[in-house]
Amino acid sequence: MSKQILGTALLACLMGLPAVAQDDTDDAVRVRLVTVETTKLATELELSGEIAAIDEIQLGFRQGGRVSEVLVEEGDRVVSGQALARLAAVQQEQSLNVAEAGLLSARAGQEQAAQASERADALLERGVGTRADADRAEQALSQAEGVLERSVSAVEQARRALQDAVLRSPQGAVITSKTVAPGQVVAAAQPVFELAAMTGFEAIFHVADDPMLRDALGTRVRLETIDIAGPTMFGVVTEVSPLVDPSTGTVTVRAQVQMPQRGTELLGASVRGYLDLAPADGVEIPWTALMRQGDAPAVWTVDQDNRVDLTQVEVGHYGDKTIFVADGLTDGQRVIGEGSQLLYPGRKVQEDQEGQE
């Protein structure tokens, strides 16, 4: 038999044999797998803000005028009653002088009227005077006493006006802002100083809105100063703004600082806060596992045959590099952590052992 005939017969035999099954792992996509395990999730939020006084005061003169003297600078610590600034008080001094002169005249008039009334009453008692004279003297005394009362009130008002020309601190505090200078004309009640009362400090944070913040009230927060050296401090969250600031898109969080007495160097200091929220049950998976099915979040899960399916989940919240799944997964399930770019339902996958840590 020639070689050509032998080759033709061999090919025919081969074509009649059943095909050898190939291992489909050659076509499987290599992925990183994560096994689902429900645990207690202790979430830590990192916040950035600054230290401020709990009680802040804005001060202004009770009357307008030209500032003649500014006695303090920003950062100065002042005591109750200490003078901070003065207005030019020439007009107030002149008004006080006029009022005091009027008071002297009113007192003299009241004394004369009182003596005249006494004489009229004495004459009436001896029978040499008339009731009409006594009544006129009594009326003159009443008018003189009214003038004296108004004069006393005018002097008090003039003295208060002179005192109001000096702006004083209502309590012990620190000057945090000054917007006035000698020669400047200010209006009544115009704020010229901001004071921080040394009754306590708070950390103020402006953070992105997060559903977890609604449970942050009363939570302890660890505080670390950024731009100055200082020991680690702790505080308690006292306020979480219920509304988002439309200008910044953030929520204001305030925490009262619990610390030993310190100086004023903390005022305005930048601070980083670490807020540990109450732990909750859930599943933590890499953020790279998150997909979408319609408008709902989803992840790729792997069955016993190493084939994938898209499963909807409920995301509890988001971390920096992870997501916390509240519902949709059960313990023991395998989830695609990385390598989902080429997947579709039913696609065969193989775990990438080299990518595992």
Image (cartoon, rainbow, N blue to C red):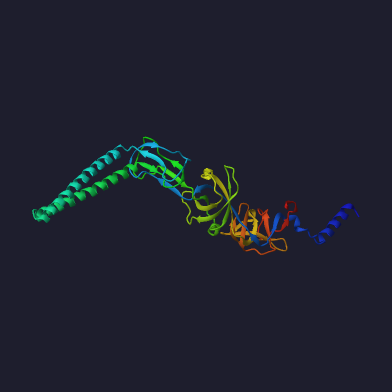
Q: Which residue lies furthest to the right in this view?
A: 1
265 sits to left or right of 279: left
Give residue 291's position: percent from left, percent from top. 61, 56
Q: x, y (%) of residue 169?
A: 42, 45
- The answer to whether residue 159 is left or right of residue 38 is left
* Residue 227 in the figure: left or right of residue 153: right
Location of residue 112 in the rendering, given as x and y in whole percent from the top left corner:
17, 46
Where the N terminus falls, by quadrant? bottom right
- Give me the residue at 53% from left, 44% from top: 263
Q: 21 or 185, which lies in front?
A: 185
Q: Can residue 312 be seen in this view?
A: no
338 or 232, which is in the foreground?
232
Give residue 349's position: percent from left, percent from top: 71, 57
Taking depth in this image into account, of 50 and 250 the one nearest to the observer is 50
Q: Which residue occupies the foreground of this view, 301 or 28?
A: 301
Q: Is residue 86 visible?
A: yes
- Position of residue 31 relative to residue 267, above or below, is below
Total numbered badges shown on the rendered structure: 0
Extreme residue in the front direction: 126
Q: In which quarter of the image is residue 342?
A: bottom right
- Location of residue 98 by image quarter: top left
